[in-house]
Image (tube, rainbow, N blue to C red):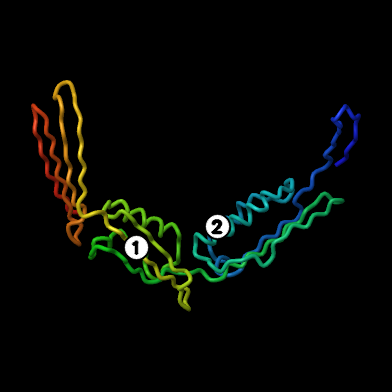
Amino acid sequence: PQIAFGKLDGATLHLEVTPGEPVRFRHIKVTLSGDADHDQLFKTLLEQLPIKEGDVLRHDRYESTKSRLQTLALQRGYFDAHFEANQVKVYPEAHAGDVDIAFASGPRYRFGALKIDSDEDVGELLNPLITIKEGEPYQASQVTDVSRSVASTKYFKNVDVIPLIDQADSEHRIPIILRLRAKADNQVELGLGASSDEGPRASVSWTKPFLNKYGHSFTTDLTVSAPRQEATFEYRIPR
C-alpha cells in the first residue's frame, strides 16, 4: 500500500491510502493422515474448504479451515487429532501466500459399553431409545440423539449422556454413562380462577410420572366450580 500525508488541519491529519494489489492464495496444501484419510466426510470437507487458490488471502478463512477440521474430528471421534503443520507463508513482493496444513487425525474411537446410572429401576424401558451400539464408530450426533430421546419420555428431570473419553481402552473404546434422575414421585399443581359464566373455580392436578420399571404413569385432574364439577383419570402405558 501507498500512504500520502495531507495537510494538518488543527488536530486532524489527512491521509490518502492506496491499497495496491492484494495478496492472494497461491499454493494451498492440506493433507490428512490417520483414519480420517479414509473418512468420506473428511474428503467432502476438503472439497468445500473456504480457501481457494487465487482468492484474496484472508486470515479468517484460513482459521476457519483449521476450525472445521478440528470440529469434524471431535464430532466423529478422532480425539487424538492434531496439526503436524500449520502455517501461511506470505511473499509481499509476489503478492502471494502459500498455505501448508497437515492434519493428523490418529485413530477413530468407538463406543464402548453403556452403563445406566439411575435413581429408578428402568428395566428394559429405554432399550428402544438407546441407539448407541458397542463397537460402532463414535459419533457425537448419536450421543445427542439418545439424550434427546430419553428426555422426551418426560420421566426424568435430568438426562446426561457422558462419554468417558479418558477411560478409553487399548482398542479406543469409550465407556458411556447414561445418568438419569427421575422427577418427583408426586407432582401436584393447584389452580384458582374465575369467569363470568362459572364464577370462582379451583383445580388440582396430581401426577405420578414413574410408577414402575415398565414406565407406567397416571394423572388425575379435578376441576370444581359452582355449576360444574369434573374429574379425569389418565393411566399411561408406553408402547
Residue 143 in the image: x percent, y percent?
A: 41, 59
- The answer to whether 5 is drawn above or below residue 76 in the figure is above
Tag 1 near tag 2, CB within 8 Å: no
Give the residue type at disc 1.
Answer: Arg
Q: Looking at the picture, tell me which residue is in the foreground, 24 or 125.
A: 125
Label 1: element kind: strand
Residue occupying image coordinates x 78% and y 57%: 89
Q: Looking at the picture, tell me which residue is in the foreground, 20 or 216.
A: 216
Q: Looking at the picture, tell me which residue is in the foreground, 180 or 127.
A: 180
Q: How many marks?
A: 2
Residue 73 in the image: x percent, y percent?
A: 54, 62
Residue occupying image coordinates x 56% and y 69%: 80
- The answer to whether 187 is drawn above or below residue 2 in the figure is below
Badge 1 is on which residue? 179
Badge 2 is on which residue? 71
Residue occupying image coordinates x 57% and y 70%: 106
Q: What is the spatial separation of the Cα atoms under label 1 and label 2, in whole angstroms?
A: 25 Å
Local crowd at mark 1 within 10 Å, few (<14), some, or many (≥20)?
some
Label 2: element kind: helix
